Amino acid sequence: MSLRHALLGLLVDRTASGYDLLKLFDTSLAHVWPATQSQVYGELTRLADAGLLEVVGQGPRGRKDYALTDTGMTELHRWLADPPPEQPRRSDTLLRVFFLDVLTPQQRLAFLNHQAERAAGHHAALRQLRDSLDWTEEGMLTANGLLTLEYGLRLTAMQEEWARWAAQLVASSDSPSQARQS
């Protein structure tokens, strides 16, 4: 996914300013695709220059309201319908796990416990988000937002469970190959 397509998607059924889009990002996409203020405003300018968005209103202090153009909708449809490119399987965490034997047993355990706590913290933040939003509203962001939120909840729960399992394994001094057999 790109910031470009995220912004096009947020403008499907509404006009919005850069400020409005940043607020929408914070309440809907920040856990999936975070973006900074400078990234959003820069991309809005590029999208407008490419004819994918148009400025439909201007307000005080240079505020611009953007709307999706037909060309922008075509691009969003193309992006959604095309199969996503194969993503490289990279995980900084798992790369570190691969070389955990370089650390002392206490450091290994601390690393894995930190991973578990980090996943638990992300999971708690997603639960809080789920519980704080009104999921009865109609619209794409509500229905599909709930689907992506559930993905995040399940993923973080699995990450926490795995890290706690791995920490138990390290704490008991069993080898991973022995644990695989159980």
Image (cartoon, grey):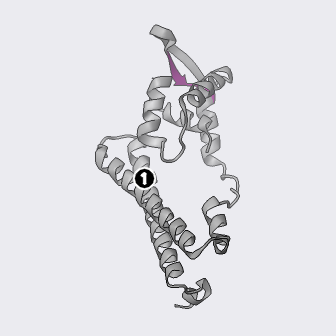
Q: Residue furthest top?
A: 60
Q: Based on the picture, tell me whether residue 40 belongs to the magenta stretch.
A: no
Q: Mark 1 points at which residue?
A: 149
- Determine whether 180 is above or below 52 in the image: below
**Residue at the (58%, 19%) spot, across then down:** 54
**Residue at the (34%, 41%) spot, across then down:** 138
Number of numbered tags placed on the structure image: 1
Please give the range of residues in magenta. 64-71
Would you say residue 122 is visible in this rendering?
yes
Q: Based on the picture, tell me whether residue 70 belongs to the magenta stretch.
A: yes
On screen, residue 61 versus residue 79, left or right, reads left
If the image is split into quadrants, where does the N terminus sit? top right
Q: Position of residue 168 (x, y in %)?
A: 47, 79
- Determine whether 49 is above or below 122 in the image: above
User: Quadrant of the rendered structure where residue 28 is?
Assistant: top left
On screen, residue 57 versus residue 93, left or right, reads left
Q: Position of residue 114 (x, y in %)?
A: 49, 62
**Residue at the (50%, 84%) spot, across then down:** 172
